[in-house]
Amino acid sequence: MSTTNLPRAAAAALGSLIFFASAGAQARDLTVVSWGGSYQDAQKKIYFEPFSQKIGKPVLDESWDGGIGVIAAKTQAGVPNWDVVQVESEELELGCFDGMYEPIDWEALGGRDKFIDAAVSDCGVGAIVWSTAISYDASKLTTAPTSWADFWDVEKIPGKRGLRRGPKYSLEFALMADGVAPAEVYSVLATPEGVDRAFAKLDALKPNIVWWESGAQPLQLLASGEVAMTTAYNGRISGINKDEGTNFEVVWNGSIYAVDSWVILKDSPNAEEAMDFIAFASAPENQSKLPEYIAYGLPNKEAAAQVPADLQADLPTTAQNIENAVPLDAGFWTDNVETLTKRFDAWLAQ
């Protein structure tokens, strides 16, 4: 807005308003966004609150359910009201390509070689390694599932099934239920015939599916008995078992693991402080505390080595748990998410 044609006093007043509005935006407290639930409760204890004490200022935290559209809206609106956000691998790749994130200062983190390869990006720093897997209530099921074939077999194990709403994971799991080996899932899914095969397998289970969207929902579905088994995030499963004494089991066979990363939104007014926070949350002495609260793998190599042996069994990165697991192919989903989401939504509406 130009003040050229305004009276001098009015122009001065407007200029003052613009200055103070800008200063108010700059003064906003650091805001960190994650996935909510027991995971974010743990983050508050080991990251958010200690970092707040360190800098002597509040650290605000919010939760979200993901989606690159949310990030795009935040960054395109001008100065974003979020600073640090934990994103999934496709959101990292898409947002980085489109310039939605600030560059990462890897020197502040001790160098890229301190982290596993999948945790290193120009735009993001790996925060956790996590898995989506089958979970069931061992106190209710007399027959325990061991595979995706069991998940699809409602005659062998009656009851509804919980799946995350969307094509990602649902299509991979459907192919494994149809006999595709974990190592071959993405090569099959990369063909039109493979996509048709996955949707045909979903057709068979569709009347028995309860769709969920946020991480807490599948565990609520299990606890209420609304589903006999569900896909769920491994850390959420171990977290609710610890906090509420449930007996939810994880089926690691055919699970899909991925890395979530910290990013700093473009034009964050707290970009420097945001980078300091990421360095704090990535430090081995801090990151190594996470499995005490929730069973996620650690991208910092030194932090992973510090995890006590009795906690290693629940981590997705432990040798026996990762043996028949599938690494999420973020490149595949970056290239195909729009097309497959349209098809999925149309299929769901049928």
Image (spheres, rainbow, N blue to C red):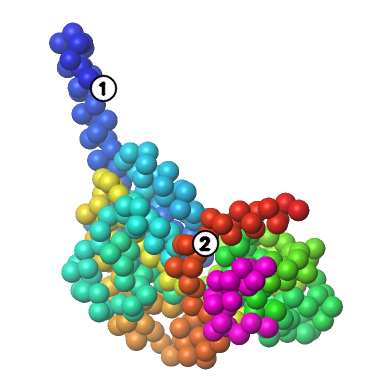
> Residue at the front extreme?
192
Which residue is disc 1 drawn over?
1
Between circles 1 and 2, the one closer to the viewer is 2
Give the residues drawn in magenta, as a range. Answer: 179-196
Task: Name the image quarter holding residue 13.
Answer: top left
Above or below: residue 252 compared with residue 350: below
Determine which of the numbered discs, if any, sits on residue 180 in the image: none
Asked if residue 321 shows in the view, the reply is no
Residue linked to disc 2: 336
192 falls in the magenta region: yes
Placement of 80 over or under 345, stated as above or below: above
Judge whether 46 appears above or below 308 on screen.
above
In this image, 263 relative to 140: left or right?
left
Q: Are marks 1 and 2 in contact (CB under 8 Å)?
A: no
Please, what is the three-letter code of the amino acid marked with disc 1? Met
Say left or right for 293 vs 227.
Answer: left
Element marked by disc 2: helix
| Residue at x 49%, y 68% (from the top left corner) | 332
Name of the residue lying farthest toward the top: 7
Q: Using the rendered image of the protein, determine whether residue 116 is visible from the camera's viewpoint.
A: yes
Tag 1 secondary structure: loop
| Residue 267 at x, y percent in the picture | 27, 46
Residue 81 lies in quadrant: top left
Identify the residue at horizontal 52%, vertical 89% (top origin).
Answer: 323
Residue kind at label 2, given as amino acid type: Asn
The prevailing secondary structure element of the residues shown in magenta is helix
